């Protein structure tokens, strides 16, 4: 099931009209603004590319911008013409009528994937009652779209999982990881772990880390005794495990790419944040990703190539539909938790490079909806450079930015020797293409589901 709800009509204000004018359109009258709104609002998308920067709040974007291109520079994600903010709260498991103001990635992902709020830890299932919620990827498949799911995390991590699985706990990633979800085990008649469900859903392109989950043995059903990888191969998947394998993958079959046992390797490194008096100001060390692992931009480019080649065919709605693709930059969040500013920025920059791939594609495929957003805010903040008499009680690192200036990044949502916490702030959402004007203003994470559903003709 999924929640149907009425949508408000979005009117393009003078501010939005000015934004659109700035990116190459000119209008003579209010009537012209309305015609633009109709063009953007009411059209259906042939293709949808959804980018999720995990933990990429406004502070994380600003930190990456300042460091990599300078305060007056602009990232690729800054160039999308229509921008708003959305709220990210979850629900309490024990009392789903009350909000949990700080979401995790599972509950937030469930919100945009299904249009329904849930409690932290749940993957596309309802708070308390544990009912399955139909996802936007499942709806896209029903409409004849080919589908893809790309992440720099394990493919069984929360954000990629919400599209392709239904379990009561995000930790149930592989057949051996089902302690928290006994009712979902295949041996108990359930749909299996996240890894098993991702393959069983028949997603056309799956690219990321997490091979350790797919190497596990299935405990029930028709593939009992086989690994998840073997079940994927039996269901028509080509399996690749390195960058050259991805590059040489040919159209015509489903593709499962597993490029690391766990999360994929990081792009940059540097000194971690520490308590006062801190480290000397630093520049980050770049280019550290192993050559046998593809970049997020590489995976995005290949996913688009393969999905575009597969669209149509014998599918029911082939003349109208293309592909649905979700791409996650996962370790922005993971390095925010760890208080590692260089690693965090490097992942944000790599995520931005993947966005540029999609925007370049959209230049010649104007019927593509591109959405860029985050799942939740995070801890990192830009603060004044510390002094003996004024410094944060948390930990921090001072960086030398592209401007040649010093920028201090602070982590203080937990004790300095503990994993830093998410925050409950609203986060950016930006878009271009059919239905893009629906992101303008302040909306909720669940509204993204309805924007996507309208774009693919499911509402």
Image: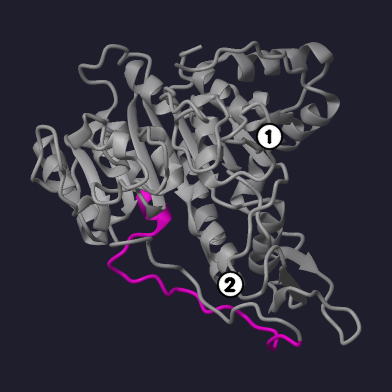
Q: Along the polypeptide, which appears first: circle 2 or circle 1?
A: 1
Label 1, residues with CA under 10 Å away: few <14, some 14-19, many ≥20: some
Residue at x-position 47% and y-position 42%? 358
* Secondary structure under the numbered disc 2 in the rendered image: loop
Return the residue found at the far right. Answer: 389
Name the residue tied to disc 1: 99
Position of residue 36 relative to residue 422, above or below, is above
Position in image of residue 314 (x %, y %): 20, 16
- Is 23 colored magenta in this rendering? no
In the visual, does 261 lie left or right of 7?
Answer: left
Residue at x-position 39% and y-position 28%? 137
**What stretch of residues is rendered in magenta?**
277-299
Position of residue 389 relative to residue 86, above or below, is below
- Is 287 colored magenta in this rendering? yes
Name the residue tied to disc 2: 340
Please tell me which residue lies in front, 30 or 239: 239
Q: Which mark is residue 6?
A: none
- The quarter holding residue 303 reads top left
Asked if marks 2 and 1 touch (Cβ < 8 Å), the reply is no
Position of residue 71 relative to residue 120, above or below, is below
- Majority SS type along the magenta span: loop
Position in image of residue 375 (x %, y %): 58, 43
Residue at x-position 65% and y-position 10%? 6
Whether residue 82 appears in this view of the structure is: no
């Amino acid at each position: 099931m999924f929640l149907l709800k009425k949508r408000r009509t979005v009117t393009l204000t003078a501010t939005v009209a000015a934004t659109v004018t700035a990116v190459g359109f000119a209008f003579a009258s209010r009537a012209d603004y309305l015609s633009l709104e109709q063009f953007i609002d009411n059209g259906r998308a042939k293709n949808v590319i959804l980018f999720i920067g995990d933990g990429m709040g406004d502070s994380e974007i600003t930190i990456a911008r300042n460091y990599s291109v300078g305060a007056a520079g602009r990232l690729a994600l800054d160039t999308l013409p229509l921008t708003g903010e959305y709220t990210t709260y979850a629900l309490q498991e024990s009392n789903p009528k009350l909000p949990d103001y700080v979401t995790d990635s599972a509950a937030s992902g469930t919100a945009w994937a299904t249009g329904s709020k849930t409690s932290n830890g749940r993957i596309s299932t309802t708070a308390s009652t544990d009912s399955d919620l139909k996802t936007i990827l499942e709806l896209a498949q029903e409409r004849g779209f080919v589908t893809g799911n790309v992440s720099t995390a394990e493919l069984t991590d929360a954000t990629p999982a919400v599209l392709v699985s239904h379990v009561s706990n995000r930790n149930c990633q592989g057949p051996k990881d089902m302690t928290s979800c006994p009712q979902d085990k295949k041996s108990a008649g359930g749909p299996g772990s996240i890894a098993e469900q991702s393959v069983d859903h028949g997603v056309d392109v799956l690219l990321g880390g997490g091979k350790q989950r797919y190497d596990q043995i299935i405990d029930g059903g028709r593939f009992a005794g086989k690994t998840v990888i073997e079940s994927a191969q039996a269901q028509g998947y080509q399996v690749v495990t390195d960058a050259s394998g991805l590059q040489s993958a040919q159209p015509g079959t489903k593709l499962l790419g597993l490029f690391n046992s766990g999360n994929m390797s990081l792009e940059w490194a540097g000194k971690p944040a520490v308590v006062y008096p801190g480290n000397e100001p630093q520049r980050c060390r770049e280019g550290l990703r192993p050559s046998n692992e593809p970049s997020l931009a590489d995976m995005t480019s290949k996913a688009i190539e393969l999905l575009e080649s597969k669209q149509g065919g014998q599918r029911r709605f082939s003349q109208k539909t293309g592909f649905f693709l979700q791409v996650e930059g996962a370790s922005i969040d993971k390095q925010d938790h760890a208080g590692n500013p260089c690693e965090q920025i490097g992942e944000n920059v790599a995520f931005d490079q993947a966005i540029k791939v999609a925007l370049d594609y959209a230049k010649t495929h104007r019927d593509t909806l591109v959405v860029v957003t985050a799942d939740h805010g995070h801890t990192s903040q830009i603060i004044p450079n510390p002094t003996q008499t004024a410094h944060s009680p948390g930990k921090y690192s001072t960086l030398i930015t592209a401007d040649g200036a010093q920028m201090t990044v602070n982590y203080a949502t937990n004790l300095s020797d503990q994993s830093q916490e998410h925050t409950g702030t609203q986060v950016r959402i930006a878009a271009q293409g059919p239905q893009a004007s629906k992101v303008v203003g302040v909306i909720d994470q669940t509204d993204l589901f309805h924007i996507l559903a309208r774009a693919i003709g499911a509402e």
